Image (spheres, rainbow, N blue to C red):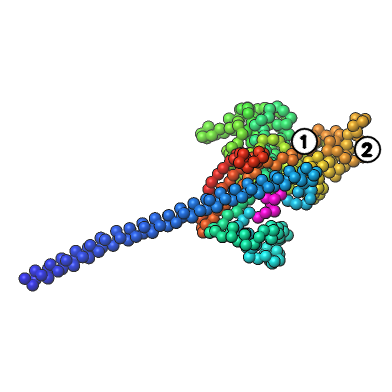
Amino acid sequence: MLRLLKNQRGVAFILVIATIAFITPVVLDFFLDSQRRVQVTRNHQKRLQAYYLSKSAVNFSKLILYYNKEVDSALSKKGVSMGSLGYEPLYKMIPLDTELLRAMVDLQGIDPADLAGEGADEESQEMMENAQNSVSQLKQDDLKNFLNFPGNFRSEISEEQAKYAINAVSKMTTASESFEIHKKVLLSILKRKLFLNFFENQDYDTVQLVNNIADFIDNNGVINDFDKVERGAESSQYPREADYKVKNAPLMTLSELRLVPGMTDDIYETLKPFVSVFHTTDKINICLADPTVVDALIVHYTNYSKCTSPLDAEDDGEEIAKLREASLMGCPDKTQVAMLLNQELGLKEIDPNKGRTAETKSTSSKVADCEIQFEDFLSDKNDIFQVTTTGQVGEVAVKMTTVLDTSAKKPSQWKVLYFHLE
């Protein structure tokens, strides 16, 4: 009897151990699964918060763009502009960055050079000073209350019409002069020093890439070289096994450029800030453009107008920079910009009374004997903006890229040309 009892106790002990061994991983798995679900829920909540913060940044960007247009309109009625008064657009002066604004609220009165950090360049110090000035215009208590929420958002606004319109060739006849000229502007951009190391033979390879880009977008199926030479079918440039062919239509996004023969990651990433698919005119708002684009236009003008000495992008860097600084003094008036450039180049104006070249330097944007006029490349339009916003809560960030056509009077009527969420 005693032996039987001992056996039963041994069996019971074994059953208990077995049960514990079985239940423990189940309970542990349940616990870990619950933890994962909690974490997923928290991340989802943070992502949702970050999404709405990013969306709020878009709405604030629209507000700043609206007031920028109102200020521009009011000043233009008086014959002046923010640029002529020495001011940048509102969306460049007002820092739409809650982290920066919170820091500015807490650090009012501190030297901007100290805020920017030791060894900071003048541009960084100027940015911090502008941020302080913007914050100082607002009521501190109201601003603190506004910024009293978890997370941060920030926004960057760039002007699309200050870039080269890569889709413009889709509306041009391939045999037209405008088609040739527009391609040559892109060629001038690709011949800047920034791209020098990306081509084995820059003169030859850049020409080939420009032709390939234009052929990918233009509205015919023929390879179009410069000087209106046609050769073969565009489809012959693409491998038979490729699952894509030439588009022969405007690009929807810049990333489609990666499909063009001869385009590499390095070239694409370097070219991206200077080109746009969101406007289709062959003109550029030079007053808001990157110096690389401005310099390329000046080099293009001197090389193809045939009325002045051609400049070389690599050898004449200092002279090109001098011409850029002098001509941009005429901003925002595109006619004044062209006139100042012609003066710096020593070009002569057309005498309207005698139909010949005047003996004095040009006081006009139109000059004699030039096959192209610099003003014909310029625009004063600034209606299309790319707004890149980021909302962040903890380590979770949501980025939105929105391209807006703000040509309508009311923000509610502004068209969204592109939207991407990541």
Amino acid at the residue labelled 1 = Asp
Q: Give the x, y percent position of residue 173.
A: 68, 27
Q: Would residue 336 be found to the left or right of residue 414 on screen?
A: right
Residue under circle 2?
359
Identity of the residue drawn at 65% across and 34% down: 214
Q: Inspect the magenta stretch and tell me whether residue 92 lies in it.
A: yes
- Out of 163 and 194, give the one closest to the viewer: 163
Residues in magenta, as a range: 89-95
Query: Residue at 73% of width from left, 42% of height from top?
Result: 285
- Residue at the spot of label 1: 376
Q: Position of residue 378 (x, y in %)?
A: 75, 39
- Up-down relation of residue 265 to residue 215 (above or below): below
Instruction: List the single residue furthest toward the left.
Output: 1
Element assignment for label 2: strand
**Residue placed at 75% from the left, 37% from the top?**
377
Image quarter (top left, top right, bottom left or bottom right) of the N terminus: bottom left
Sequence-wise, which precedes: disc 1 or disc 2?
Answer: 2
